[in-house]
Amino acid sequence: MSGLRLSKPWTDLDADAAAALPGQLGVYEVADGQGQVMRIGVADARQPFGLRSALGHELARWGPGHRMRVEVTHAYRSRYLELLMLYLHDHGRLPPGNDDDPTRIGRLSPA
């Protein structure tokens, strides 16, 4: 059931790319240079400039050499939890950057 997974192309996470992102709400993934997802995040109402702000913070956190992909959505909370559940289903754990996430998530069993 690949339609649930984030399938946007990866782009380099750098200052120019983060600054070019829309100030909209949505979800994102940050991966290392080998494509391993390091964090699944959400740009919600707490981010003053949506995805642009959120990925700027991620760049400061992870540094150069990482990649990102984003999805603009007004259903950001549901989509965020869905992506976390899918990752948990696929890997048996959350991404390293989500280990401290206090959100209780359910379980998905995609076919």
Image (tube, helix red, strand yellow):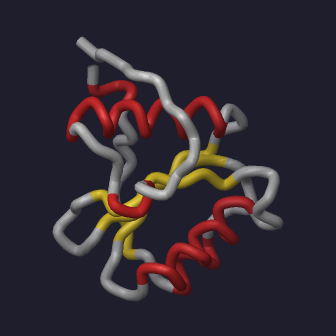
Could you tell me residue 31's position as x and y percent? 32, 64
Above or below, comparing residue 92 to residue 34 in the picture: above
Asked whether, in this view, residue 10 is left or right of residue 33, the answer is right
Q: In the shown orientation, is residue 40 left or right of residue 103? A: left
**Camera sees residue 69:** no
Q: Position of residue 103 (x, y in %)?
A: 57, 41
Drawn side of residue 90 relative to residue 28, left or right: left
Frontmost residue, 19 versus 29: 29
Residue 33 visible, this orientation: yes
Residue sitting nearer the eye, 81 or 105 = 105
- Which residue is at 21% across, 40% downward? 91
Examine the rendered structure and indicate whether residue 65 appears above or below residue 69.
below
The answer to which of 97 and 44 lies nearer the viewer is 97
Q: Is residue 93 left or right of residue 15?
A: left
State the quadrant of the N terminus: top left
Residue sitting at the far top = 111
Q: Position of residue 99 (x, y in %)?
A: 41, 55
Q: Which residue sits at x=23%, y=60%?
A: 36
Residue 25 position, x and y percent, is 71, 49
**Vertical comparison of 9 with 3: above or below:** below
Residue displayed at 43% across by 76% down: 13
Figure label count: 0
The quadrant of the image that shows the C terminus is top left
Of all residues shown, which one is farthest toward the left? 34
The residue positioned 35% from the left and 70% from the top of the image is 67
